[in-house]
Amino acid sequence: METTSRAGAQPPAAEGGQQFPSARRTVDGFLRAPFPWYGLDEAFTGPRWLMQVGTTADGAVEHGSIGHGDEPTVRNEHAAGGDQDPKEKFAVVVTVAAHPSRPTADGTGLLEATSVSSAAWLAGVGLLSFTWPGQMDHALRDDWLEQQTETAWVLADDLDGDDWSTLSLPVDGVPTAFHYRESEFGWVLAGSTSAGVHVGAYGRGMSAYGLGFAVVKDIAAYA
């Protein structure tokens, strides 16, 4: 199965440390992308907000995230017991450019191919960025996050494994198969589109089963 390396697709928290909605990127990075962005379809009528974009070493936009619903905060006290904060209902859609391995801009190396696994890993790490198990000391969270990030990579590299199930959801109105899994922290899914991108998503408090995805017609309207 074709995957992308973690060096080629950095997690949402990679730029300048842990990333929160309060530090969302502007629309500029999204406008530089040579691929279409995906979000929830028109059936979702709640708030939508831009998060961050991820770039390659030569500055090319490779992936980015758009949030829907309530802007999440790092979840701590409720995580261990599985309780849900009724005010924390969100879904984040991650769009990843689909491409084969290709040379770096300076010609000195190769950027590895992206795949559905890339979208699954970015979505898994994205969910972790808003998660903090209860009764864990703040000083230990970085170690926990590093361990869980590695676990997310292992899971994303085995989408046909027992940890994943298959879920059919509409993409631009067409039923599309997604890899799907749940945990005590929320849910993650990933699949591909006919528009040349991979789509991942993660959320909490909102059921994934009723979601649909569509191309964002005017990303500038999110600014």
Image (cartoon, helix red, strand yellow):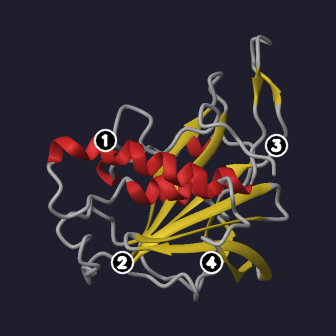
Q: CA distance from mark 2 to mark 4?
A: 17 Å
Which residue, given by chain and number where applicable, does mark 4 sit on? 41
**Could you say which quadrant of the image residue 162 lies in?**
bottom right
User: Which label's residue is closer to the chain start, 4 or 3?
Assistant: 4
Q: Which residue is mark 1?
A: 143
Element marked by disc 3: loop
Question: Please, what is the three-letter code of the amino acid marked with disc 3?
Answer: His
Q: Is residue 30 above or below residue 68?
A: above
Pointer 2 or 4: first along the chain: 4
Label 4 and label 3: CA atoms lie apart by 25 Å
Residue 129 visible to the viewer: yes
- Image spot of residue 5 (x, y percent): 66, 37
- Dot 1 or dot 2: first in sequence order is 2
**Which numbered mark, 1 or 2, is in the foreground of this view?**
1
Total count of labels: 4
Q: Is mark 2 in CB contact (under 8 Å) with mark 3?
A: no
The residue labelled by disc 3 is 99
Using residue 176 as the reference point, say whether residue 60 is left or right of it.
left
User: Which of disc 3 and disc 2 is earlier in sequence?
Assistant: 2
The residue closer to the viewer here, 91 or 158, is: 158
Does 106 sit above or below residue 104?
A: above
Position of residue 124 in the picture relative to residue 112 (left or right): left
Tell me the amino acid under the disc marked 1. Asp
SS of the residue at dot 4? loop
Task: Count neighbours of disc 4 (C-alpha within 10 A) and say few if under 14, some if 14 to 19, many if 20 or more.
Answer: some
Give the residue type at disc 2: Lys
- Residue at numbered disc 2: 89
Q: Position of residue 105 (x, y in %)?
A: 75, 18
| Disc 1 to disc 2, C-alpha distance | 27 Å
Q: Secondary structure at mark 1?
A: helix
| Tag 2 near tag 4, CB within 8 Å | no
